[in-house]
Amino acid sequence: MAASQSPKAASLSVPNPVPLELIDDESRLIDAALAGEPDAFGQIVEQHQDRLYSSLLRLTDSPEDAQDIAQEAFVQAFLKLSTFQRNAAFFTWLYRIAFNLAVSSRRKKRPKTSLEAVREAGGLEPTATCHAPDGRTLTAERVTLVQNCLAELADEHRSVMVLREIEGFDYEQIAEVLTIPVGTVRSRLFRARAALKEKLQTALGEQWLEFVDETD
């Protein structure tokens, strides 16, 4: 006989739906961890570490930073576990901790070389070749370009772009992670998309229309 779905589980909403049995198990693991069971939180880490690392890698563009921030996020989540209200998905709460750590770490680092400087040095200009690159090469180059442009956005713009366009969070989840109103999420996302478009146009120059055709 199928298990009935509790109101608490039914209210959970995550970017990639988690099976109900995993949510129930996770809730029991949280209870066990709070009760002092030594292995319980380790199982929670195993459930989320790959996804969290992947998300942070997109945000930081650094495997080392992503690993360090993920570890620190789990440490803080363990220390703050008693404050988790369970009115949202655990990963959303964990991601908020990790995201704040990532933003703080990013602000402490020296700014990267601007795309404009790279372009002026010839780094983004097409090079002469006897054969046109295949579709996979072009796609990889475009992905790298978008990632580089994304990295140049202001923190508040990059944040909403990563959460919305890469992680697939809805507006309410983004508002929860960033602790801002939903209306602010919408306005920041609008400005972030406009800023990203402007950077891509600057980087690509006359190749912009070709890029748009490829992404349609």
Image: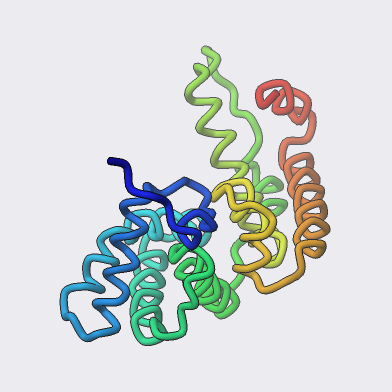
Position of residue 24 measured from the top left corner of the image (x, y, whole percent): 33, 59
Q: Vertically, is 198 above or below 13?
A: above
Residue positioned 76% across, 31% down in the render: 208
Front in this rendered view, residue 63 or 40 = 40
Colour setup of the view: rainbow
Q: Tell me where residue 184 appears, x and y as whole percent.
A: 80, 65
Side of 84 where 128 appears, left or right: right
**Which residue is drawn at the image coordinates 70% and 27% (left, top)?**
211
Furthest-front residue in this view:
1
Q: Is residue 107 left or right of residue 52?
A: right
User: Measured from the top left, where is residue 213 in percent x and y?
Assistant: 72, 21
* Residue 3 against residue 175 in the figure, above or below: above
Q: Is residue 75 above or below residue 112?
A: below
Where is the N terminus found, in terms of image quarters? Answer: top left
Vertical placement of residue 79 versus 137, above or below? below
- Foreground: 190 or 119? 190
Residue at the location (25% across, 73% down)? Answer: 41
Rendering coords of residue 130 (x, y %)? 53, 13
How many numbered circles are shown? 0
Q: Quadrant of the C terminus?
A: top right
